[in-house]
Image (spheres, coloured by chain):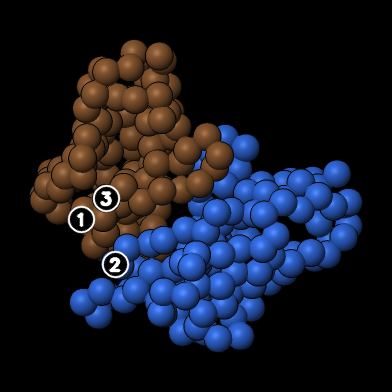
Amino acid sequence: GIQVEQSPPDLILQEGANSTLRCNFSDSVNNLQWFHQNPWGQLINLFYIPSGTKQNGRLSATTVATERYSLLYISSSQTTDSGVYFCAVVGGGADGLTFGKGTHLIIQP
Amino acid sequence: DTAVSQTPKYLVTQMGNDKSIKCEQNLGHDTMYWYKQDSKKFLKIMFSYNNKELIINETVPNRFSPKSPDKAHLNLHINSLELGDSAVYFCASSPKTSGRMFAGELFFGEGSRLTVL
């Protein structure tokens, strides 16, 4: 099956900082999503982005499908951005959404 | 109002018991899923149903049996619970996009935390 690698695994930043999270995948994809799992365990949809660039407020994402990676940008971090960020993809074999291991982000006041 | 809802949110039970988790979606999606999140936060697909038909059945003990009475509901029944079954179980749903299964955006429920003592 498709492999999904996220980096960095852990990230600690001060409030106001910017960050870039990366997701590499091993095969062509039909679907790519970014999720934020907040400290209460809820999985929040951030972006549905199999290709191209999208922006939503302080967050933006870019997927370069031909080079098999996606980036999630968080600007002007707030403490409420803390949590785990997951990248998930559906590979060409269409075997459901496969998740990376996540980036654990801590934003300190 | 909730798009994907699961019940119960918390479940504490003894080893050997049988329990069920229910899931309902009001998004009109054709495809539903069960995912398991372990203690290290890793999310892995267990099952997927498309319009009541089982599509994905990953390597999961046969003590786990999904049931889809209609395309808006996907329940998970677990027999003879073991300590290792303790986890958070997430239900999700997605639409079919451009005729390709699993290509649509997934929406998750809030999860059901199962603790086996």
Judge from the rendering whether residue A11 lies leftward or rightward of residue A28; answer left or right. Answer: right
In-image side of A3 versus A39 (left or right):
left
Q: Which mark is residue B103?
A: 2
**Mark 2 in CB contact with mark 1 (< 8 angstroms):** yes
Query: Mark 2: which secondary structure?
Result: loop
The label on residue B24 is none
* Left or right position of A92 against A43: left
Given the image, on which type of amino acid does mark 3 rest?
Phe
Q: Which part of the image, by quadrant, shows the C terminus of chain A?
A: top left
Residue placed under numbered mark 1 in the picture: A50
Q: Is residue A28 above or below residue B56?
A: above
From the image, state the color of chain B: blue
Q: Which chain letter goes with mark 3?
A: A
User: How many numbered markers are drawn?
Assistant: 3
The chain carrying label 2 is B
- The image position of residue B7, as x and y in percent, is 67, 63
Mark carried by residue A47: 3
User: Where residue B10 sits: x, y (%)?
Assistant: 72, 51
Type of amino acid under label 2 = Ala
Q: Colour of chain A?
A: brown
Classify B38 as above or below B26: above
